[in-house]
Amino acid sequence: MREFPDVLGMDLSDAIARMKEKGQNVSVRITKPDRGDPVEGYDRVIRQEEEAEGWILTVCRVPDAYR
């Protein structure tokens, strides 16, 4: 397993920036809660997985109140 920055819980844009700083390739998978997607909010990294070409970041939109 490669060394990588821990980006769990981070805002997606900050997580991507940190991964790119370290020269890591990143792809994003979006998941939604059962009751629909909050219209306003931000995307938070909830899972980080290694793949052959880099990393998959799974994100979920959370309301601003949880920022």
Image (cartoon, rainbow, N blue to C red):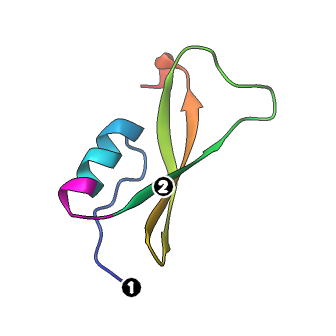
**13 or 47, nearer to the observer:** 13
Q: Residue furthest top?
A: 40
Query: In the image, residue 3 lies at what x, y percent?
Result: 28, 77
Report which residue position mark 2 lands on.
Answer: 27
Callout 2 amino acid: Ser
Vertical arrangement, residue 66 with respect to residue 51, above or below: above
Residue in the picture at 24% in, 51% down: 18
Dot 1 or dot 2: first in sequence order is: 1
Looking at the image, is 44 positioned above or below residue 29? above
Amino acid of disc 1 = Met
**Which part of the image, by quadrant, shows the C terminus?**
top left
Q: Quadrant of residue 10?
A: top left
Q: Position of residue 20 (x, y in %)?
A: 25, 55
In the displayed structure image, the side of residue 19 where residue 39 appears, left or right: right
Question: Which numbered disc covers residue 1?
Answer: 1
The magenta stretch is 20-24
**Residue sticking out furthest to the right:** 34
Which quadrant of the rendered structure holds the N terminus? bottom left
Q: Nearer the viewer, residue 15 or 8?
A: 15
Please identify, in this view, whether the residue under mark 1 or under mark 2 is nearer the observer. 2
Front residue of 7/20: it is 20
Up the image or down, 12 lies above or below 40; here it is below
Q: Is residue 67 magenta?
A: no
- Where is residue 8? Give x, y as percent: 42, 53
**Horizontal arrangement in the rendering, residue 30 relative to residue 1 (left or right):** right
Give the number of the disc on residue 9.
Answer: none
Q: In what element is the residue under mark 2?
A: strand
The residue sitting at 28% across, 63% down in the picture is 5
Name the one closer to the observer, 45 or 28.
28
Real-space Cα separation, disc 1 to disc 2, in angstroms: 18 Å
Crowdedness of circle 1 by 10 Å Cα count: few (<14), some, many (20+)?
Answer: few
